[in-house]
Amino acid sequence: MPDSISSSQSGATSRTIFPKGPSFSLEDFSSRDYIVKDFIESLSDTANPTRRSGVGAPSNSNQPFDPKPLIRTFEHAQRRLNDLSGDLEIRENELSAAVRRAEAQHTQNLKTLGRKLNETIESFQKLDTSLNGGGGIAAEVTGGTGNMAVEIGRKLEELDRQRRRALDAHFLIECWDEVCNRGEITLLESLRRSGSSEGRIRSAHIARQLLRISQRLDPLSWNETNGGSKAYRNGASHPGANGAGGTGASGERRNTREIIEKFSETLEKDLLKQFDDFYRKANFDGMKDCATVLRDFNGGSSVIALFVNQHQFFIDRSQLVNDEVGGDPESWERMADPDAETPGVEPSLQSLVDEVKVVVQEESAIIKRAFPYYDEVLGRFLQRVFQQSIQQRLEMVLDKASSVSSLAFLRCLQSSRSYISALVDDLKAHGLTEHPDAISSQTAVVLDQQLEDLFVPYFVGSSYIEREKKMLEELFTSLMFKFTAYHTRRKKAATTFMASLAKSGSEFLASARDAYVNRLDSPDFTPTQKKTLLRVAGLKEPSDSVKQPDTDLTDADGQLNVAFAKRMLKWLAEGVGRGLELSVNSETPKDVSALLGLLLLMMGEGYIEVALDAALDSAAAQETAKTEPDLGYLSNLHAAISITNLMITCINTVLIPLAAGGITIRREMEKRTNAQINRIEEKINTIEQRTVDAALTWVTRLLSNQKKNDFRPREADGTEWLEMLQTPTCASVSAFLTRVHNIVLTSLPASGANVRNLLTELALGTRSILLEHFKRFYVNGPGGLMVTKDVTRYVELLKSWNIEDNVKAPGGLLDVLLEVGSLFVIGPEALRERIRGGTAGGATGGPGNSGANGGGAPAQGKGTTALAVQEVRAVLHEAVLSGFLDVITTLIDAGAYVNQAISEYCTSGFVHRFNIVRVDGCTVQVTSKGATPLMQACGFMLAEPGRYQHRRPEITLPIVRLLLSRGADTRLRDASGMTALHYAVLRPQLPVIRLPVESGSPIDAVDQEGRTPLHYLARCAESKFTAINSKVIRQGNLVDAIKRIDDGLTPLGIAIREEKIKMVQVLTEHGANFQNDTDINLALGHAIEQLDTDMVNLLLSRGACPMQTAITKLVKSFIDQHKGTELHEDDTYAKFVHILSSRILAGADVDPYTDGSKSPLTLAARVPGSKILLRSLLSFEAYVAF
């Protein structure tokens, strides 16, 4: 704007009389550069030249300000602005009117278009109705028109297809004419060279069609031999008419097959060459076009083979396939060493697998871009990688490992499979052609199948587990070589010529070693394996140049070694873990069962039991020895118990849980394990018992050296006897017992009750022998002091041991000796006063009563009545065990204490300490220590055979009633924690069991083994159990688990394991709970076999799940119930139908096939009169195969 204003003033170099005002228009104000301040300044600048002083005149700063030019300029500008405002208003009104007219026109246009749209929609609806055959007369007219249109369109399409087929046929005929008449294929060549993928695809199709035409119209060309082409040139006749059959215009015959195949070969080679060129140029679109054509031409096999065979990975690897498997020799030795950690996967195989991972991931992207059928190509590529590269290298590595040792083979097999499995998992996680998405199911199946095929040869049948067992057996045998040789020599060694045993021992070891080395020299053992086994056996490798010195077997070689057992269990655990990792089928229960059998055979029978048998032979020999017994054999017991505990822990923690999938196998494993443990425990108990017997026999022999005058010193002997602390016999007995005590403490585990029980038995046996010993001597007054000294020494020694409190506590069983000793130093009057005062025979039948008669008589020199009261103590127990009710009544009426507990049971001088009772698989060691008459009456069948041969429940029942009526306490316990009810249920008889229960005997009482009466009752025969009153089991679930003996099983669990279905039924009805699904399903199977409908309903309501073979088992049970007779509708049949419907409703399959082809229908059809059975099965839609 300032420029326009200034330009209006340009050219005026002199002042005018009437100066012009500034000139501007609306466009000046509508400009984007318009600024009010600049506009005012331009007006002011325009007013300055109108001053009087000219332009060229000198400026006078003192000239007064003249406002008039400014006033005139601004007045002119105001008038101009008013004029512009009026013009702007006029233009605004015109534009507003134009907008209103445009809006009205727009509204009118919208109404018109809406009306036309509605008319179109109505027309479309009418047309649609007519095409769909709408109702009404009008619909019939329009419907006919619509159908006609559709039919016309269909016919047009058919005509178009026929036209295309006709054109194709025409082109095909032209091509055949060229081939058979002129021997050319120009049209196809032109089509092939067209450059388009559609042209190449069409040429491939036509070439295949021409081959079929040639085969049909020109069979001579297909039957042509090597010299057959001459027939064409010589004008031989050929079947065919109108030029067919390859007859040219000159009469020369054409071999159409050869021409077409040559073109096809050229086409294929050209396409393959183009594909290869595109591959080298990374032109994936061209590759895809070629692959598509070849796919239609020959299924794509040639292009896939070209892509795979010429891959650089296979070219490079083919040069390395014959390379020997290397590796560090030390690594192979570590792999063959059972005590060393596995080095890992073989380096060359690891390198190959790592390279395969990279190559497959890279090539999968190329394959997806180059092939439209990329899944198939990738599958072929993976097959080639696994079957050629990986499999060849894997076989070489495993062959190398097999040449090292069997353990190296197994370890190498495990590491290789683990590493290749990781490769498959990584490829699946990558996605390959679907990257970054999840891998396709087809490719995943290919990978899994290839992995499976790699290792199938190594897991055929039971080959793997047999190899594993053989390897472990060789290791175990080598580890126990010296142990086995020692005990073999022990069994063969003569008992005479002891001086020559050392020589024979070295010779025996040499011969055993030579035999073992000769066995290792067989082709089954590699040099490395032989070296390893000799090292494990502790033998040196034989050398041809230097003869190895013979080393004699030592006693240490025949001892059990806990470290050896740990090594054996470590090897077994490694084998189990390897089997789980390599397991590719459902044979895990069978495999662990086989390994359990090996463990029990090698460690249980071949190691622990052999050592225990040796200890048992030594213990038996000590009983008849003429010298002091050598108890060195006890040192094996500590190791035997420790190794047994380790073996049980391994079995229960590792092996048995892995057999959970096979109920039958698991039960068999548990039975075998329990049988093995029972044998070991029985042998240990026998060894300890024989140890006690040998020690007591030697104590008796030492006491037999007691001089008759030791307790009858004479005055002529002076006072030397007063200075003696004890007799020489007492000193020798004490020294011997001290040695035995020390050996027991060092030979048996400190924890547990073994040491305590053995020492307690030894102390009680010594006590009984001493009491019998003192009965044989006459004692005078001074000799009583020596008796007292000896007795005090014996008691102090025995009380210093870790024995039971009721034996060594004040007033306990050992204090009887002190009482006896005191009887020899008191006078007759004091003795009579003690008897009258009841000091020795109080309410508890205490120790004073034991020697009342026996003490006074010897003091007076009358040994015939010595210690008679000791025998009287057992009179009530003798009467109870003999079943003499009248004698029992007389003794109780005479003041016999009905709750008298004795320490042992004596018969004819024989101390009966243990009574082994087997209760249907459970071994119970019953002692009479602390037993009351009521316990002996309830357990009358636990006595010696001679004592209960005349006993019957009807005789015992009055005795139990009498004892209970006279105050017998049912809550008392013996030394083993057993109550009267425990004794009653060991040989259960209903009348005998009912009385203690009704008298308040605690049903939930737990003995030292952790068992309640109900746990023993759960093991009894079902024929005895059926009549047991429900009062016995009303609190059957009070004890949830047994801590030690029964593996944490409740009574219900025991009944299920022992297959006592009646017991299961009663316990379940009284609220007992199942511990797991296996128990309840096992009980359900037994209930089906018994056709017990109530039990089946109860178990199904408890959540039992039907097995697939349940219906088969039900049919077998129903048939067995009739025992081969003709089937008929009876109560058994009603039970069968009821259980069948229950099982079908619960989800069991009526058509399971087990035992070959024996389905339920097949089993039923083999029984006479099975019509009703077949009808029942068919009613549940059993399938009949034709």
Image (cartoon, rainbow, N blue to C red):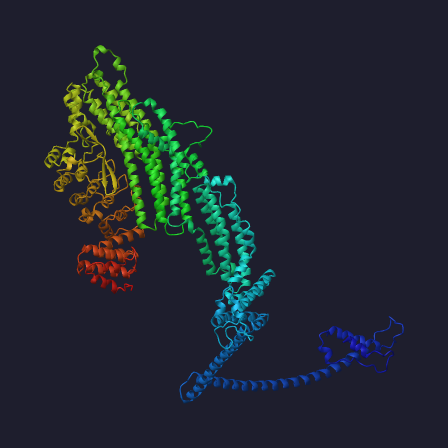
| Picture coordinates of residue 249, whole percent (x, y) | 55, 76
Pick the residue in front: 813 or 683.
683
Whether residue 21 is visible here, answered yes or no, is yes
At 52% from the left edge and 41% from the top edge, which residue is drawn?
Answer: 328
Which residue reaches farthest right?
57
Left or right placement of residue 3 versus residue 951 in this view: right
Left or right placement of residue 964 versus residue 258 in this view: left
Quarter in which the C terminus is drawn:
bottom left
Is the residue 566 above or below the residue 256 in the image?
above
Q: How many marks?
A: 0
| Picture coordinates of residue 197, whole percent (x, y) | 56, 69
Which of the 4 image quarters holds residue 853?
A: top left
Whether residue 814 is visible here, answered yes or no, is no
Left or right placement of residue 91 versus residue 759 in this view: right
Pick the residue in front: 633 or 904.
633
Left or right placement of residue 557 versus residue 382 in this view: left
Is the residue 187 above or below the residue 1034 in the image?
below
| Picture coordinates of residue 936, whole percent (x, y) | 18, 37
Pick the residue in front: 520 or 1036.
520
Pick the residue in front: 919 or 527.
527
Which of the 4 image quarters holds residue 632?
A: top left
Is the residue 401 above or below the residue 134 in the image?
above
| Picture coordinates of residue 102, whole percent (x, y) | 61, 85
Quarter in which the N terminus is drawn:
bottom right
Which residue reaches farthest top?
716
Which residue reaches farthest left?
886
